[in-house]
Amino acid sequence: MKLVLIGYMGSGKSLLGKHLSQVLDIPFQDLDTYIETSEKSSISQLFETKGEIYFRKREAILLQKILSENSNLILATGGGTPCYGSVMKDLLGSNNVLTIYLKCSVDTLTERLWKEKESRPLISHIKSKEVLNDFIRKHLFERSYYYNQANITVACDGLSEKEIVEKILFQLF
């Protein structure tokens, strides 16, 4: 079984994926890290030098490569991964793949991302929390169609990492 974590940036996909990996004793893979290793370049450099279309095409190809491997895995995707091309349709149509949407409110995401915006190229230029909140609200609205197709949705607001993992495990078993 492959558990694929989706959700907006800052929703905790990588953090929770690592925690689930330890609890379930299943390997963890971060798609962005996999792409960076494969491309020998950071995500921000890929966007800057080759553009988003190139990045999204490579992301979809490398995601299919991971999904085609015959092993159990917990995969943290990028925030935009399920929203491009046929990626979400492919995830939902794949055997032994379960998608889990880590759903956070705009306010929760704003608080989390404001603290780490310098390390996030997509939002590093934003100068105020209000503008960041509007940016997230718009993006989340655009992406919610894809996120809401996930097999499982876990509401994460106000919960600790441990509580979210317990919610995921409860829905899995």
Image (cartoon, rainbow, N blue to C red):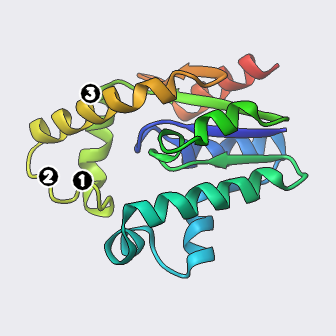
Q: Is residue 74 above or below residue 34?
A: above
The amino acid type of the residue labelled 2 equals: Ile
Residue 123's disc is 1
**Pick the front one: 43 or 133:** 43
Residue 26 pos. (x, y %): 82, 47
Q: Nearer the viewer, mark 3 or mark 2?
A: 2
**Pick the front one: 105 or 95:** 95
Q: Is residue 88 above or below residue 29?
A: above
Residue 126's disc is 2
Q: Earlier in the sequence, mark 3 or mark 2?
A: 3
Instruction: Tell me the distance, in whole angstroms, between the alpha carbons under discs 1 and 2.
Output: 6 Å
Q: Secondary structure at mark 3?
A: helix
> Which residue is rendered at x = 55% and y = 37% of the image?
6
**Pick the front one: 137 or 157:** 137
Quadrant in the picture for the N terminus: top right
Residue 84's disc is none
Residue 94 is drawn in which quadrant? top right
Please say if the residues under marks 1 and 2 sit with CB atoms less than 8 Å apart: yes
Would residue 42 be found to the left or right of residue 23 on screen?
left
The amino acid type of the residue labelled 1 equals: Ile
> Which residue is rendered at x = 49% and y = 79% of the image?
41
Report the number of numbered marks. Answer: 3
Q: Secondary structure at mark 1?
A: loop
> Which residue is rendered at x = 84% and y = 35% of the image?
95
Residue 107's disc is 3
Q: Residue furthest bottom?
A: 40
Quadrant in the picture for the C terminus: top right
Q: Nearer the viewer, mark 3 or mark 1?
A: 1
Residue 53 pos. (x, y %): 42, 60
